[in-house]
Amino acid sequence: MTSQIINNFKRFDAYAKTLEDFRIKTATGAFITILGGAVMVLLILSELHTYMSPNISEELFVDTSRGHKMRINFDIIVPRISCDYLVLDAMDSSGEQHLQIDHNIFKRRLDLDGVPIEEAKKEEILVSTTSVTNKSSEITKVTCGSCYGAAFNESQCCNTCEDVREAYKMRRWALPDLATIEQCKNDESIEKVNLALKEGCQLFGYMEVNRVGGSFHIAPGKSFTINHIHVHDVQPFSSSVFNTTHIIKHLSFGSDIKNANTAPLDGEMGLAKEGNKNNLYQNLYSTT
């Protein structure tokens, strides 16, 4: 009974096979069989890859929010310039300038071998205050210090080393040897100058900037703007003596994105083979 049912079912076979004795195997048939099998395997693997791959949808939209800031995280080592001579500046296309940024920025002094000399210190903005101390010096006794020819009028006084620097800066004159300036003899400026090329510095932290086109840089010398021109005062040195070789341990814009490389410059080293060589990595802030 069962065999009869099977025989009746076989009548529906539209591809009846011939007997083994009447079959002829050819090289062409073998080639077509192998080619067809390979094509089927490739199609299956391709469909499997497409199924397993995530679907990325790209969208472009206008950010209409205002007043929001973007965070820039960084950790950069400059092994041949001291922390006292390095400043961080940021400028954007809206005209806003952040000179000598020190909020949320830490500086760690390093020796020339890269070994930390002391713990990292956070730079704070100093507020001028008037205080009375028991220490007396010749500078405090002077009621109106000399500007060494850089004064614009007879009533201008330079009672501190910084006042003399500012006077020469406004005149656009080269600053003389600090050791010859009375106001600078007991000032920390001479020690900072002596250590400028004998130490390294690690700068790390973050800053918040406007979400518009702009740039930021780390450079030696005090920065200021004259006639809308951004300059750095590196006196008493020349700009060519500074070795701006640096190592980027970390640099990222905005918040981290999962499964995305948001810090492509990590581990990058900028080697300054010539004096005061500049490296340009990013001239526009990312807005993502």
Image: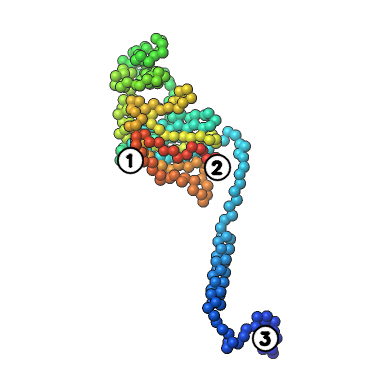
Q: Which residue: 34% across, 34% down? A: 275
Mark-to-mark CA distance, 3 and 2: 69 Å
Q: Between residues 83 and 284, which one lies in front from this camera angle?
A: 284
Which secondary structure lies at badge 1?
loop
Q: Which residue: 54% across, 34% down? A: 210
Circles 2 and 1, Cβ within 8 Å, touching? The answer is no
Q: Between residues 215 and 86, which one lies in front from this camera angle?
A: 215
Residue 201 appears in the figure: no
* Mark 1 surroundings: few (<14), some (14-19) or many (≥20) residues within 10 A: some
The amino acid pointed to by label 1 is Gly
Which label lies toward us, 1 or 3? 3
The amino acid pointed to by label 2 is Thr
* Mark 2 surroundings: few (<14), some (14-19) or many (≥20) residues within 10 A: few
* Mark 3 surroundings: few (<14), some (14-19) or many (≥20) residues within 10 A: few
Relative to residue 56, is residue 224 depicted above or below? above
Residue 254 on image: x %, y %: 52, 41
Which secondary structure lies at badge 3?
helix
Residue 122 on image: x %, y %: 41, 33
First in residue order: circle 1 vs circle 3: 3
Reading the image, the residue beneath label 2 is 288
Q: Which residue: 51% across, 45% down? A: 256
Q: Which residue: 41% across, 31% down? A: 87
Reading the image, the residue beneath label 3 is 6
Label number found at residue 114: 1
Label number found at residue 227: none
First in residue order: circle 2 vs circle 1: 1
